[in-house]
Image: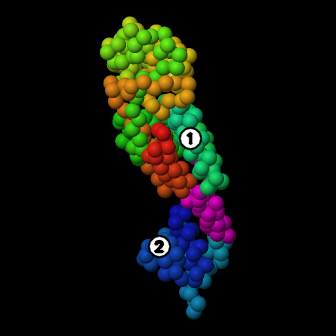
């Protein structure tokens, strides 16, 4: 039994008119009339009688309406309570971001959003993995990438230069400050695993692999090894902090493009659109790298 025909049945009985039911459903008169006819063939009996005040349900229709109205009410409840939430600034937003952004930047943005929209709550997934947004593991992904997935919608919000970083006491052990020309004279902190796909670490492996004393698979970990004085770390400048001294920019690494990504199906979900726009505003502001 076609649910669309049951909706027509319910609305014709409510309004006493096929044309009014068609208008309420945003369909034409002939479509509504055909659905009533099809329903009558399905149940094997007449559903309405013509009267001066319009269409009057037959006893058979009255019996069906008991159940059809319950279904229609249930559908309206879903639309009002469930679907409607997607258009309200409330509910959970799941964000995945690299560790450093999750640790340093997201708390600032989340605090501002929470003050303006207290009914939005958050799940933060700190990860460098390429999470599948199709499975709704996350609603919004913040990623450093040159090639965002084509099936997602997104926005490039920042470009982060790279630099060399050392601890403040590291340079006390050497008479000459490091440069690209003299890098081989210093202990270096390199990458391993997926980090070798980044320009900085592939360049280091090619030119100074013999000087690499420590390899890490995550940028924040590298920064703390550098802070301990164990070598020169090559990091995007958003990793800078008081315990690290930034040297010259590291040109072989160029920049890291920061993208905000989400699944196209979520573009009209109010809470996600709000969070996406607030994140974009923050990452595009001088505050992010300042």
Q: How is the image coloured?
A: rainbow
Secondary structure type for disc 1: helix
Query: Which range is magenta?
Result: 66-94
Which image quadrant for residue 1? Answer: bottom right
Q: Please indicate, yes or no, whether residue 181 appears anywhere in the rendered image.
A: yes
Point 61% across, 55% down: residue: 116
- Above or below, 153 relative to 97: below
Give the x, y percent position of residue 229: 53, 15
Mark 2 Cα shell of 10 Å, populated few (<14), some (14-19), many (≥20): few
* Magenta span main SS: helix
Secondary structure type for disc 2: loop
Give the x, y percent position of residue 149: 38, 39
In this view, the residue in front, 138 or 187, is 187
Q: Residue furthest top?
A: 210
Mark 1 Cα shell of 10 Å, populated few (<14), some (14-19), many (≥20): some
Point 39% across, 16% down: residue: 178
Residue 187 is left or right of residue 242, and the answer is left
Which residue is disc 2 drawn over?
26
Which residue is disc 1 drawn over?
106
């Amino acid at each position: 039994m076609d649910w669309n025909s049951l909706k027509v049945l319910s609305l014709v009985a409510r309004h006493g008119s096929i044309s009014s039911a068609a208008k309420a459903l945003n369909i034409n008169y002939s479509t509504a009339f055909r659905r009533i006819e099809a329903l009558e063939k399905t149940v094997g009996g007449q559903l309405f009688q013509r009267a001066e005040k319009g269409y009057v349900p037959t006893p058979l229709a009255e019996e069906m309406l008991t159940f059809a109205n319950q279904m229609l009410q249930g559908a309206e409840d879903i639309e009002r309570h469930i679907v409607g939430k997607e258009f309200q600034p409330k509910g959970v937003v799941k964000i995945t971001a690299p560790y450093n952004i999750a640790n340093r930047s997201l708390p600032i943005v989340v605090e501002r959003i929470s003050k303006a929209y207290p009914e939005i709550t958050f799940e933060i997934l700190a990860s460098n993995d390429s999470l599948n947004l199709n499975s709704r593991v996350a609603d919004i992904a913040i990623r450093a990438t040159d090639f965002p997935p084509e099936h997602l919608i997104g926005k490039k919000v920042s470009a982060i230069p790279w630099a060399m970083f050392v601890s403040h006491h590291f340079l006390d052990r050497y008479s000459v400050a490091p440069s690209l020309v003299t890098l081989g004279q210093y202990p270096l902190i390199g990458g391993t695993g997926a980090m070798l796909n980044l320009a900085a670490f592939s360049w280091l492996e090619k030119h100074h692999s013999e000087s690499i004393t420590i390899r890490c698979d995550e940028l924040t970990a590298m920064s703390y090894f550098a802070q301990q004085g164990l070598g020169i770390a090559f990091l995007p400048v958003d990793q800078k902090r008081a315990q690290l001294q930034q040297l010259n920019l590291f040109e072989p690494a160029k920049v890291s493009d920061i993208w905000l990504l989400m699944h196209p199906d979520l573009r009209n979900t109010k809470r996600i659109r709000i969070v996406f726009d607030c994140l974009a505003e923050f990452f595009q502001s001088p505050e992010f790298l300042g």
